[in-house]
Amino acid sequence: MSDYTVRALRPDETRTASELFRAALHVPPLKDEDWTYVGRMYQPGRTLGAFDSELIGTARSFDAELTVPGGKRLPVAAVTGVGVRADRTRRGVLSQLMRTQLADFAERGVPLAALYASEGPIYGRFGYGVSTLAHDHEIDPRRVTLRPEVPAGGEIETLGLKAALERLPEIYAGLPHPRPGAMTRPPYWWPAFERHMREEDKPPVTIVHSGPDGVDGFAVYSVQRKSWREPAVLDVIGLHAANDEAFAGLWRYLLSVDLVDVIRAEGRPVDEPTALLCTDYRVVKTTAVTDDLWLRLVDVPAALAAREYEGEPVVLEVADTLLEDNSGRYRVGQDGVSRTEAPAELRLGVDALAMLYLGAWPASALVTAGRVQAADPDAVARADRLFATRPSAWCGTHF
Ligand SMILES: CC(C)(COP(=O)(O)OP(=O)(O)OC[C@H]1O[C@@H](n2cnc3c(N)ncnc32)[C@H](O)[C@@H]1OP(=O)(O)O)[C@@H](O)C(=O)NCCC(=O)NCCS
């Protein structure tokens, strides 16, 4: 028996939840002037609180859409703001919040849930799996020479803070986001971005790229230098390009910003060809390969049926201890997905299924790691082909 209760918070309780979450992340509470806009990121009815005599834990979510292989967009509950008061951890509070949240998503018919994890060991037990990967890059711009065939790019315009906050939601929505794992940015996402943009010690700069058909890309970056004796670091906070000209044009600009010693671009797609722009491939160093988006298939049959596949079918047996309706056998093929009584060829938990779903991991790698049990090698080869995706999965919308 738990000695606490979990319920949805009222709007007047969300600021306390924000303070609890920020304390769990070891950051100070928001100032009143920041809360006036940051408070808008709380979708009504979607912040849970755990209480004993007072609030001891919280988790929230907001609605967005996620691109799945083949290009369809599925509703996704974006989970964030998860924290438990330091004097109440490791007694099941998060587990109760997660169970309540998943039951709510299932009841509302949301097929997917997703999150960014502060630490690796937390969310697998709730059926989340690493579904997109990302590269962190470090570049010495003074050593970069672009190859002669790199597109010239179009016009670059810098936007002030006000213009950036006004225009970026529409610009982002207007760009194609074909990668599996790409997410829409609803109004509940933008206040956190605004908060980031208003951080006084590193004011970000927004650049917009225009080609013959108008705006087709943008990047946001900030430059920090602790003192004139230390290197200046340009952090690429975001970069989205609709085509090759925009990609090249944005990088041409970033690589030419004056008084910069190091460029850091974190959380980039693993197959993004930044290094291929340069005469010396090695100037773009990959300093880390990290987990990007964690996905949870809330409605396994609906999620499996929504994506496209290529190749011969395979029978999966999925185990889901939290949402038991998902458990069972599925025949998955390019002609469709159906429940089946046929013998299982691959057995896996719903967390491993999330790792397969967007194509971030081949089934064979999950078999090697013991995350998937296979009846025979032929089924593994078929699953490798069925779930593979190009371009590589990437979210790039942190929340
Ligand atoms: C992460 C956090 C929310 C966990 O809350 P909690 O109430 O302690 O979690 P629970 O007691 O429900 O833990 C459930 C299980 O997960 C494990 N677990 C929880 N957090 C863990 C962590 N950070 N690392 C490793 N294991 C963890 C617990 O040991 C427990 O395992 P068990 O079932 O085998 O006993 C809490 O520690 C916290 O607020 N951390 C700081 C903020 C943060 O990182 N938030 C997440 C943002 S994405």
Image (spheres, rainbow, N blue to C red):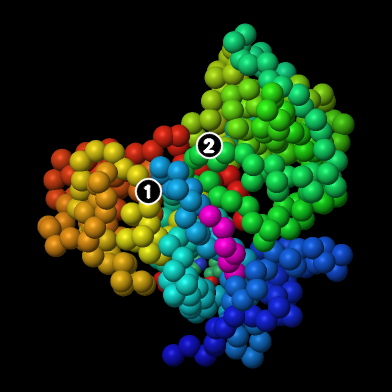
Q: Residue furthest top?
A: 148
Q: Looking at the image, is mark 2 or mark 1 earlier in the sequence?
A: 2
Residue 227 or 312: which is nearer the viewer? 312
Image point (32%, 61%), residue name: 301
Q: Which residue is mark 1?
A: 307
Q: Which residue is mark 2?
A: 269
The type of residue carrying mark 1 is Arg
Image point (57%, 83%), residue name: 7
Residue 39 or 372: which is nearer the viewer? 39
Q: Quadrant of the C terminus?
A: bottom right
Instruction: Give neighbour class at mark 2: few <14, some 14-19, many 20+ (Cα, 10 Å).
Output: many
Q: Which residues, given as a range, are shown in magenta?
A: 60-65
Image point (37%, 48%), residue name: 307
Image point (68%, 20%), residue name: 153
Above/below status of 324 relative to 160: below
Q: Position of residue 363 (x, y in %)?
A: 29, 45
Residue 103 relative to residue 316: left or right: right
Circle 2 or circle 1, nearest the eye? 1
Q: Position of residue 157 (x, y in %)?
A: 80, 30
